[in-house]
Amino acid sequence: MTNTLCVNVERQERRVYYLHRYKARRFPEKYLTVIDDGMDQKTTNIPRLRRKTKATCNLTNVGTHLVGGIFHSGQSSTGKDIFGSFDYYQWPHDPNLTATVLLKMLMEWCKCYKLPPVFNLQLDNCVKENKNQYMMWLLALLVELLVFDKVCFMLMPN
């Protein structure tokens, strides 16, 4: 019973995201949809070796963390643009990093395109970095400063 409920909730959340993505591509003068997520497992560590040999098994890996965003909009020729930011664990992974990267990605977007009045943002359901009062305050501030008329905040399942 619980698994069925979780699958249905995830399916519904994906449908909502796909609807927002469609609206952003179809009506770019009104909507911008962004999905933002981080990747900090061993998949981004460097060097990434196919095989470990005796000579390479003691190499030190450089830990890297990637936060990326896919910006869906009909303003882009492909319907989406991808932005990312790497860090080498020199900053804490907290709401400040998430907010800083989001604002930097928005500034990069503004170099080529106009910001529409409605901003749809989808983040994963991580309490530590995304689902907290600081992200809510940032999104409220974007509306207060008239950067956007409306911000829709969606959480995707883990």
Image (spheres, rainbow, N blue to C red):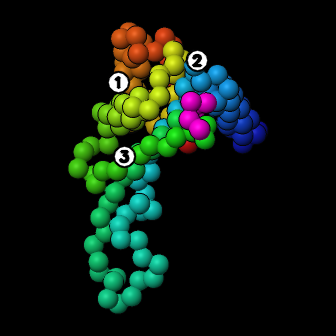
Badge 3 marks a residue whose secondary structure is strand
Residue 150 percent location from the top left of the image: 51, 13
Q: Which residue sits at x=39%, y=31%?
A: 111
Q: Is residue 65 visible?
A: yes
Badge 1 marks a residue whose secondary structure is helix
Nearer the observer, disc 3 or disc 1?
3
Q: Which residue sits at x=44%, y=32%?
A: 112
Residue 146 is covered by the magenta coloring: no
Looking at the rendered structure, which numbered label has been put on residue 30?
2
Residue 20 percent location from the top left of the image: 64, 27
Marks 2 and 3, how far apart at CA: 27 Å
In the picture, residue 78 is in which quadrant? top right
User: Predominant secondary structure in magenta?
Assistant: loop
User: Which stretch is magenta?
Assistant: 72-77
Q: Compare residues 127 and 89 and report the one nearer the observer.
A: 89
Q: Which residue sits at x=43%, y=57%?
A: 41
Callout 3, which amino acid?
Ser
Q: Which residue is mark 3?
A: 85
Badge 2 marks a residue whose secondary structure is loop
Marks 2 and 1, how far apart at CA: 26 Å
Quarter of the image for the N terminus: give it.
Answer: top right
Callout 2, which amino acid?
Lys
As drawn, which residue projects farthest toward the bottom? 54
Q: Which residue sits at x=35%, y=71%?
A: 47
Residue 50 percent location from the top left of the image: 47, 78
Q: Which residue is mark 1?
A: 134
Callout 1, which amino acid?
Tyr
Lower sequence index among marks 2 and 3? 2
Lower sequence index among marks 2 and 1? 2
Marks 3 and 1, how far apart at CA: 20 Å
